[in-house]
Image (tube, grey):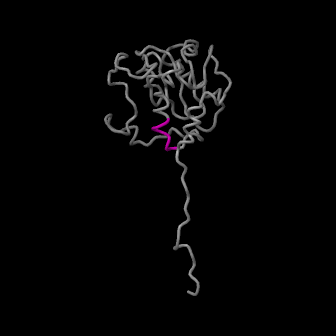
Amino acid sequence: MLRKFICGNQLANSKFFRHPSALNITKRQLFSPPDSDTAPPNLSGGSTPAESLVTGCDYNHWLVVMDPPDGYPPRNQIVLRYIQTLSLAIGREEEARRAIYSVSTKYYYAFSCKVPEELIHTIQSLPGVRWVLPDSYLHPYEEGYGGEPFVNGEVVPYDDKYHRSWLCCEDDIPKKTHRKRKGKNKLQAGV
């Protein structure tokens, strides 16, 4: 649910569903004061698990939102980048593979991992990491975090069912209509 809110509502207007540069956010949004509506989510408020009202948010499961990769790298290279990033914080690639439980490589660039809260500030400081947010269940009555499952150190073959909430939300985004302009471009007869 939190994943859909952060990545869906805040970035939906950018139509990032189709291009890797989709998560480009203006400097105003990245560097605005914490109480601003455009500021990125911040964990420094000292929230505790008892304060969480979001189902499945236990402060052990984290969504790490990354900067989009340059160009259009293959899916396995994107996933390898996630593993390498987390291994910088954890210390070993095998441990990073075990900690990651889902990845997103199509509609947004992020991975979910189960790590202690003490590592979050280390992960936030790594190159390419945009945000680290507490992960929560995608739907309150289903115990699933969303994204493409990462099982036994490997990502499962891609299937659109892992992004059904993104696909249905894409239909909710109003389409721009193009109207023809009147007057100025017409040549006047007889002049």
Q: Quadrant of residue 147?
A: top right
Image location of residue 175, percent across then percent down:
55, 49
Which residue is at the far front? 141
Look at 57% across and 39% down and name the residue there.
Answer: 17
Q: Quadrant of residue 188?
A: bottom right
Q: Is residue 80 left or right of residue 45?
A: right
The reply to whether the magenta stretch includes residue 2 is no
Look at 51% across and 25% down and name the residue there.
Answer: 139
**Tag count in the figure?**
0
Q: Is residue 112 left or right of residue 154?
A: left
Q: Which residues are magenta?
A: 8-14
Which residue is at the far bottom? 190
- Viewer-closest of 5 and 172: 172
Look at 62% across and 16% down and name the residue there.
Answer: 151
In the rendered image, the quadrant that contains the C terminus is: bottom right
The reply to whether the magenta stretch includes residue 12 is yes
Image location of residue 101, percent across then percent down:
56, 18
- Viewer-closest of 126 and 173: 173
Q: Is residue 16 left or right of residue 55?
A: right
Image location of residue 54, percent across then percent down:
42, 23
Question: As displayed, is residue 158 above or below residue 90?
Answer: below
Which residue is at the far right? 157
Secondary structure mostly taken by the magenta-highlighted segment of the chain: helix
Q: Is residue 95 left or right of residue 60?
A: right
Image location of residue 72, percent across then percent down:
63, 37
- Viewer-closest of 105 and 5: 5
